[in-house]
Image (spheres, rainbow, N blue to C red):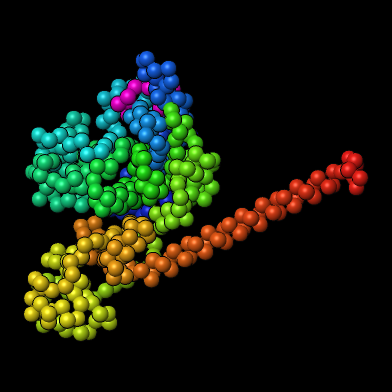
Amino acid sequence: MNGTTGATEATGNAGAAGRGAATTGATIELESLTKRYPGNPQPAVENVSMEIKAGETVILVGPSGCGKSTTLKMINRLIEPSGGRIRINGEDVTDIDPVKLRRKVGYAIQSSGLFPHMTVAQNIALVPKMIGWPKARIRARVEEMLDLVGLDAGEFHGRYPRQLSGGQQQRVGVARALAADPPVLLMDEPFGAVDPITRDHLQDELIRLQHELHKTIVFVTHDFDEAIKLGDRIAVLRERSHIAQFDTPEAILTNPADDFVSGFVGAGAALKRLNLTRVRDVGITDYPTVNVEDPLQHIFNQLRAAGTNEILLLDRRGRPYKWLRRGDLMRAKGSLARAGTLVHDTVTRDATLRDALEAVLTDNAGRVAVTGRRGEYEGVVDVETLMNSVHEMLEADRLDAMEHQHDLEEARAEQTHAEQEGFGGNGAKA
């Protein structure tokens, strides 16, 4: 960590484009960070030291009560540290005005934390307004943020939080946290209060946003699968936020530091690795599609001409609506209203192989539609492609294990040879 004051360009495989290309994160250094509460003999957090790179997503994961949320809240001083230092881009923020600090650090929590008496637009505009942005810039930023999180500005601008679904509220919460373009985003179990399907989609949305924006994200969760899916690195914390292991998801899955980390990873580490590969990394194929506004004869013709036994019907916005099989229209007497099977699940390009496999197996039809940021159809991924990727992953793991075993045997042989070189044949040292 060099302590420079300028933001460092984040590196990685995400190609930032458009408005997000110039936005970068900031380095964060925690030095002996400690929190003691009066009347408690043991500190809640004790001597935590950690370096987080600019543009990196770091996940704090550990059992309930281990101090992970307390550690997170000390970064923006919602909880004041009892000791230690916090540096953001080399600047010691421990002694600066905490209100000014919080305006420079985005913060998203469980259940969104939106103000119920404010509209969506007013919630998002809150911090830009507080720091004195001009009205025209704020209006443009609100629209930009809503577009960024996949919500139509015209539709959601004037709504109140109570008029939104849980997933929509969380999207607005993230938009509000990002509105003033902070280099750092803190997230405290932000998706913990929504249903599993919405949670998967929100996780995918966060991954997509990070590809565009390259923020520095510190994210608290108790869900290790979520940590694997989202994190560049994961800090597995014991009680009082003592760091048991701080490493990449791959390293923690394949080489846990001790029994505590192994227990937290749990069974099925090989299957958990499915969370490390995205749908975008495997083959997405095109599929014959028709639109609900197409004439029935055109749909009949497309069904006959399709190389598959079914076709995907899209709604007026180009989103997957129904799977139509040959004979569906005949049995439904030519009516699209009764024909076909509704599309119940889709995945995005940022979904994991685990998400995709679950969707395919739930559907029982061997394929799942892939959609874009607004739910528009982009292609299909099938079970054969997914299983081939799983087999390749397992084969790579097998080869890595063999190589690791070979290295261990070579090391033992070298050690034995060195010991023999140092002693004579009768056991006396030469």
Specify the segment rendered in magenta: 75-87
Image coordinates for residue 266, horizontal then vertical, percent? 45, 47
Residue 78 is covered by the magenta coloring = yes
Q: Is residue 202 above or below residue 96?
A: below
Closer-to-camera residue (256/202): 256
The residue sitting at 23% across, 65% down in the picture is 377
The residue sitting at 80% across, 47% down in the picture is 418
Q: Is residue 263 left or right of residue 133?
A: right
Q: Is residue 340 above or below residue 71?
A: below
Closer-to-camera residue (191/80): 191
Image coordinates for residue 263, horizontal then vertical, percent? 47, 43
Q: Is residue 372 above or below residue 240?
A: below
Q: Is residue 165 left or right of residue 49?
A: left
The residue sitting at 35% across, 62% down in the picture is 357
Q: Is residue 228 left or right of residue 177?
A: right
Image coordinates for residue 61, horizontal then vertical, percent? 40, 39
